[in-house]
Image (tube, rainbow, N blue to C red):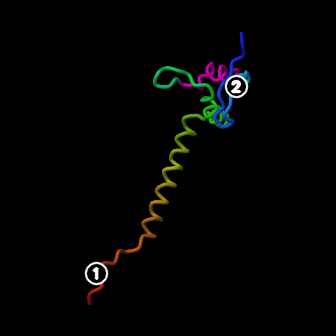
Amino acid sequence: MGSIEVYDYNKRRWIPYVPDYKKWEQHFADVTEGRVHPDYKGRYIVGRGSRLRSLSDNIDVNLVSPVAQSLEMAKSELKRERQKVIRERVKKPKTGYNQLET
């Protein structure tokens, strides 16, 4: 029984295949935690969970009461209304050829 070899197109020669066990361990951990989703054929592709892993590590969830949530929503709506009023004030009147005639 011989060793498995793969062709390296960059080096243009056959090299022995050495599997990366850490990569597979991380893949199986991602699959169990639901970070890897199958493609259109139902296959799980190794290494696709890294993007979702980095996104899920940075998520900060603050649980608040319904009253606090409604207060935050009201504040954001007021802020949007103020920005809308400021934008309307800043708009310059449009001048056309008809208005330039004397």
Q: Amino acid at mark 1?
A: Tyr
Q: Using the image as rendered, state which of residue 66 and residue 81 is in the foreground.
A: 81
Question: Tag count in the figure?
Answer: 2
Residue lying at the far front of the rendered structure: 13
The residue that appears at 48% across and 50% down in the rendered structure is 77
Cα separation between marks 1 and 2: 67 Å
Residue 7 on image: x %, y %: 65, 28
The verdict on residue 43 being magenta is: no
Which of discs 1 and 2 lies nearer the camera? The answer is 2
Closer to the N terminus: mark 1 or mark 2?
2
Name the image quarter holding residue 51.
Answer: top right
Image quarter (top left, top right, bottom left or bottom right) of the N terminus: top right
Above or below: residue 49 compared with residue 85: above
Task: Report whether residue 74 is seen.
Answer: yes
Which amino acid, mark 2? Lys
Tag 1, which secondary structure?
helix
Assess whether residue 32 is covered by the magenta stretch.
yes
